[in-house]
Image (cartoon, rainbow, N blue to C red):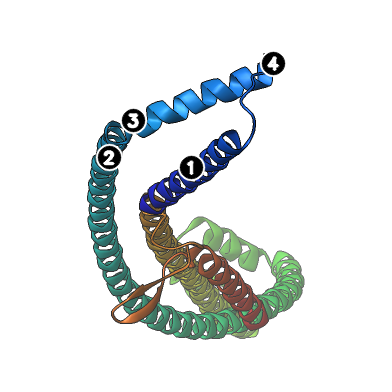
Amino acid sequence: MMQEVATFLANDALVAEELCEEEILMCLGADSGPNFTVPTEKGERRKSRLQIMDDEEEEPLGKYLKENERLQQASLRLEQENDSLAQRLISSKVALRRALDQAEDQVDQLSKELVQTQHQLKSTQEQMKSRDEEAVMLKAVFRRELEKADENIQRTSGITADYKQICSQLTERLERQQAAHKQEMDVIKTAVAACSSCSHALQTLETSSEHQHQGEDMSPACAPSREGPRDSSSNSSRTDRETFREQITELEQELARTKLQMVEAKCRIQELEHEAGILNSSLQAARNTWLHKAMTSLRNSGAAARRSLESSPSIWDDGTWYMTGRGPVAVSVTPYRMKLYAEEEARREQRQKQRASENV
């Protein structure tokens, strides 16, 4: 503004000098030439101009005083504008410094949060690794128990088939013995029916419950001949029946034990399946919780950085770097990092799923 005022004054001085030179030349021409007047408009304009110049020459002091006053007022106005601009500059510098301090504080806080998040990430990765190892161990145990249960089921099915075969064989043998015993009884009955005393003894044997009267009621002639075969056949059939009953009882007990073992194996398999489901659900919940926390913290950090950038846009131009006493500091690169982090998490989950499918 001061340069403009100086140029303006210089131009005024040049105009005044040119006017003075023209006036001098006109005065010299008027003195040297003849004195006659031509009533033309050009002459009238020249005359009025000369009169104005005479008036200006008569009062140059007032003119310069007015010009000086005007310039002083302009100088005061420019000083006031300069003061206001300086005050605005100072206030803007203070605001920018305050915003810069806030941004530095936010950067420090975000760096601390980043360190904490990295520690949490490491601890969570260690927990995930330990849980993966536990899951692998549980899968191995579950596989072994399942193989044992399959072996027990196969053994139980084999025992059941053997038991059925033995029962069928014993049933056939019992039927054969019953048929032979029936034939023997028919032969004995026919032999006894031929003798009147023996038939009477047979009737008394059937009606009475005491076995002592058998020898007393039978005739001395038929008793020695028939008593021996009856006793031997009854004793052999009784022993066979007892052995059959013992074998059947043992087989029933073994079948009951096998069924109990099969039920216990099924219960154990169900318990292992339930534990495996609980571990998988807890692992998935822990993974989802950690991922949600990490994404939330990163999202909050990015939002805070963007807010700080939007609140003070004149500190930096591209919204990416600004200078501090410690060097350039990055501010708004969190969306790209979040994208990379999400892609890495997706790849890690895919690898874990592939590993789990291969283990299964």
Label whose residue precedes the other's in the sequence (3 or 4): 4
Residue at the location (32% across, 77% down)?
115
Which dot, 1 or 2, sits closer to the camera? 1
Q: Compute the Cα span from label 3 to label 1.
A: 13 Å
Q: Residue at x 48, y 79 (%)?
A: 135
Neighbour tally class for label 3: few under 14, some 14-19, many 20 plus, Cα within 10 Å:
few
Query: Which badge, 1 or 2, is on the more N-terminal residue?
Result: 1
In whole angstroms, how far apart are the C-alphas of marks 1 and 2? 21 Å
189 to 120, vertically: above or below: above
Residue type at tag 1: Cys
Q: Is residue 233 visible?
A: no
Question: Which mark is first along the chain, 2 or 3?
Answer: 3
Q: Which of 327 and 155 lies nearest the eye of the viewer?
A: 327
Badge 1 crowding class, 10 Å Cα cut-off, few under 14, some 14 to 19, many 20 or more, is some
Callout 2–callout 4 Cβ contact below 8 Å: no
Q: Which mark is residue 58?
A: 3
Closer to the eye: label 3 or 2 = 3
